[in-house]
Image (cartoon, rainbow, N blue to C red):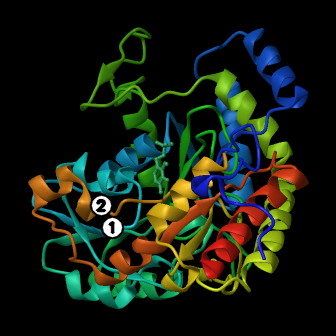
Amino acid sequence: MTDRIPVLYGGKPIRDEVLGYGSQSITDHERQAVIEALEGDYITRGPTVEEFEERVAELVGVEHAIATTSGTTALHLAGDAAGFGPSDEVITTPLTFASTAHAATYNDATPVFADIDPHRRTLDPDAVREQVTDDTVGLVPMHYAGHPADIEELLEVADEHDLTVIWDACHAFGGSWRGEAIGAQRDMAVFSFHPVKNVTTGEGGMVVTDDDELAERCRRLRSFDMEYSPDGHDDEPWFQVTEGVGYNYNVTDLQAALGLAQLDRLEDFKQRRDEIIAQYDEALAGIDGIRTPPEPLESDPMYHLYAIEVCEAFGCDRKEFVNAMHAENIGVQVHYVPLHYHPHFQEEFGYEPGQFPETDRVYDGLVSLPLHAEMTEEDVSDVIDSVNNLGIYHSQR
Ligand SMILES: Cc1ncc(COP(=O)(O)O)c(C=O)c1O
């Protein structure tokens, strides 16, 4: 018997304040670091950005890390460095944020969607194989929620067809697969440091790679594609020239100082996320009609999202579930409306609803519950109680 009527059906909200699905965690440690950076010589890209890049490269175990203004611009740079261009096709997942596909579209290539493996919710290697044509040059898998894609098999597909791989690891910073950091896999990986992600720099992103040439190309494009010491001009120190259409994707030392301070707390962030996930798993696994996220396979992910699937047996559909949670002030979210439902991808590339059945099936029930390092025990139990209570209410109707 439920002791509380869900607010959607006339009861009172479980909490007065909205609990967001994601949030940054900022302490005096970060505040102090940013103030110190502000008092330094550089407030644009300076030595602190370099230090941040070195720390990330070391943490991931790669040669190069190139900081940019966002995960989106990191994908742009990586796609450009990979040489994606007009008449090229780049295969990616429809169950992602639009920026994943922009590794192709920003570079005038065509994004080609392949269906997902519904267990991992990431690109299905066999579906990828079916989409490969003579024009396919690249692959952009995304580690959904932080859960690693089928890295081994996707690399095999890339080898079979000589594809450049850009891992969209925007959800997965801080995790590992077979003892190797997520992001260390070839050819490049991309992180986002948006406030809801595993660590933040306000806005920010990073390309990581072991490849010297790709790294150099990303660095140049990030900053105007400028040659600062062209051959034959050694005695003309002012002679700096652009060699192509580059961008200004420079990040500031202030952001890098914030990022470095966040990295100091990375283990704590992971531990807190893991604790919350364990509590959710235990409490929700037994509820009829709730499918909890997949178990990690050969990996120790740092999860960005805790995405459940609400199935028929729960007694209401996803829409009602989301509205019921919002009414309780539990800020659940859906990641994502698949890209073949977006007008841009439909109008430009002819995608249609229903084209990717596994993606559609997963999407139908998908809901991300709040997950971030600042959540208190009370926050966690508010979420669990709300879900539980809604399930009981439906079972008694
Ligand atoms: C999977 C994925 N890729 C790329 C991005 C873009 O990152 P940013 O917001 O830093 O541009 C996001 C951001 O939400 C994302 O979730």
SS category of the residue bearing label 2: helix
Q: Name the amino acid type tagged 1.
A: Pro
SS category of the residue bearing label 1: loop
Q: Position of residue 245 (x, y in %)?
A: 25, 31
The reply to whether residue 64 is in sight is no
Side (left or right) of 195 relative to 273: left
> Which residue shows up at 13% across the image and 78% down it?
134
Against 193, residue 343 (above or below) is below
- Looking at this view, is 12 or 323 the one in front? 12
Q: Position of residue 333 (x, y in %)?
A: 54, 54
- Looking at this view, is 7 or 305 the one in front? 7
The mark tally for this picture is: 2
Return the residue at label 1. 94
Q: Quadrant of residue 82?
A: bottom left
Is tag 1's residue or tag 2's residue first in the polypeptide sequence?
A: 1
The local crowd at label 2, few if under 14, some if 14 to 19, many if 20 or more residues have their Cα within 10 Å, is many
The local crowd at label 1, few if under 14, some if 14 to 19, many if 20 or more residues have their Cα within 10 Å, is many
Q: CA distance from mark 1 to mark 2?
A: 5 Å
Q: Which mark is residue 339?
A: 2
The reply to whether residue 89 is in sight is yes
Q: Name the amino acid type tagged 2.
A: Leu
> Which residue shows up at 15% across the image and 58% down it?
346
